Image (cartoon, helix red, strand yellow):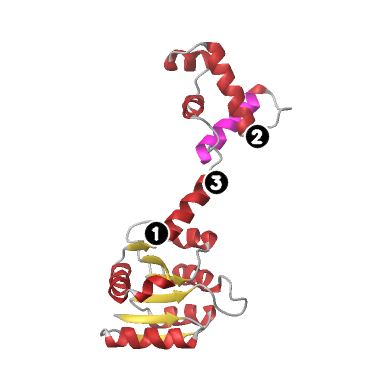
Amino acid sequence: MRIVIADDAVLLREGLIRLLTESGHDVVAAVGDGDALVEAVVTHRPDISVVDVRMPPSHTDEGLRAAVEARRRIPRTPILVLSQYVEVSYADDLLATTGGPGGGGIGYLLKDRVAAIDEFLDALGRVAAGGTVLDPEVIGQLLVRRRRDDPLAALTPREREVLALMAEGRSNTAIAQTLVVTDGAVEKHVRNIFTKLDLPADATTHHRRVLAVLTHLRA
């Protein structure tokens, strides 16, 4: 495979070059910052790029942002991100670029996984072939974030059922008949939904109902 490496740590970069070269691959570019990564991807159109998250100037998330930009410039170009930590926001952005036909080719591994050379090379091959490879720690943190960001997370299963029926345009009476409960029970669920979704108390009941349904549709 033709590979681009982006890592500002010279020792790690040289180590990756040697490992990949000895494994029969061609390292077409090895760079140390995000702008150079984007330029290398556009110029060389590699089979895959191996990218460190932390690169100059701030050594925070430049590598991930550059990877997202590289995917924007060259859609579906395979990217394998290596990191000492999980940057959830840009990991989400990077994974979002896998949407659509043939849109895979994304990997996100913590650097300690690279020590298992066979597993690293296997992940490299799978990502280059269009697959998605995620470190278990990455998956865990993404799930935590999504649960935290879910506006419906505070609702009980029954309240979610009521809200889904509200979204179908059903009245409280129709919802009560569908769920085989009393009108009073439905009214209580609806009040709880309004409260948990933090909908403005000064709005009319009709407006709060619309806002609740919009929240459901966007979740």
- Name the front one of labels 3 and 1: 1
Q: Relative to 64, does residue 203 appear above or below in the rendering?
A: above
Residue 136 is marked as 1
What residue is at 35 percent from the left and 86 percent from the top? 27
Q: Is residue 26 visible?
A: no
Q: CA distance from mark 2 to mark 3?
A: 15 Å
Q: Residue 5 lies in magenta, yes or no?
A: no
* Numbered marks: total: 3
Give the labeled residue for mark 3: 148
What residue is at 54 percent from the left and 59 percent from the top? 89
Q: CA distance from mark 3 to mark 1?
A: 18 Å
Describe residue 126's horizontal placement relative to residue 186 as left or right.
left
Image-quadrant location for residue 207: top right
Instruction: Give the main secondary structure of the magenta stretch.
Output: helix
Q: Is residue 188 visible?
A: yes
**Boundaries of the magenta span:** 206-219
- Label 1 SS: helix
Q: Residue 211 lies in magenta, yes or no?
A: yes
What's the residue type where badge 3 is placed? Arg
Give the labeled residue for mark 2: 198
